[in-house]
Amino acid sequence: MILRRSMMREMMRAKRISDKFVERIMLATTAVNDCRYCTWGHTKMALKIGISQEEINSIYKSDFDDIPEEERLGLMFAQNFAETENKPSKETIHSLFQYYGKNKGNDILNYVRMISMGNLAGNTVDAFESRMNGIPSENGSFLIELLFYIFSGGPLLKKFFRD
């Protein structure tokens, strides 16, 4: 299923999921995918909306004990989605929809898909830069990394995230 702009607008306009829950989803997914750009950006956004640094650290350690109970399954789903390389089992998806219902379940799934795409983008930019430093990614492709670097704004990311 493709995440269309119209779906994203409707999902964000409906506000079925709180801003804090959205950021927790972003953090839980990024914790698995390990994108430094998304880690930086979503940590900053989470702090801005009132999520404590302690809670952020817990999410990055997959410790959901202090997360509101009604959000835990969503965060575990986000984590599983990333761990299974965007291929959760039918049972996992069924559990998500059974617990949250159709609309909220779809929103969670779509937020997880969005951040997964963002994580992939950031990690592809890093793979290209690593390749240029003589350390190619084991499963990477120079052409795909180069094209993605150029068209995704890789030079801008590099400017903002100098090590």
Image: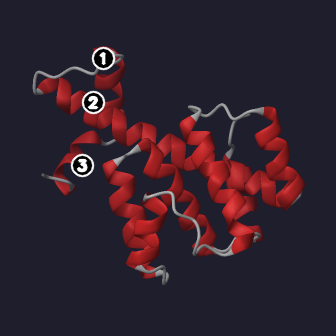
Quarter holding the N terminus is: top right
Label 2 SS: helix
Q: Quadrant of residue 104?
A: bottom right
Residue 127, disc: 2
Mark closer to the observer (2, 3): 2
Residue 156, disc: 3
User: Residue at the location (66% across, 75% down)?
Assistant: 68
Q: Along the horizontal axis of the image, is 80 left or right of 73?
A: left
Residue at numbered disc 1: 138
Q: How many marks?
A: 3
The kind of residue tagged 1 is Glu
The kind of residue tagged 2 is Ala
Q: Position of residue 3 (x, y in %)?
A: 68, 42
Mark 3 crowdedness (10 Å alpha carbons): few <14, some 14-19, many ≥20: few
Residue 70, disc: none
The kind of residue tagged 3 is Leu
- Which color mode does the image show? secondary structure
Q: Position of residue 144 (x, y in %)?
A: 36, 20
Q: Position of residue 137 (x, y in %)?
A: 28, 21
Q: Along the horizontal axis of the image, is 43 left or right of 100?
A: left
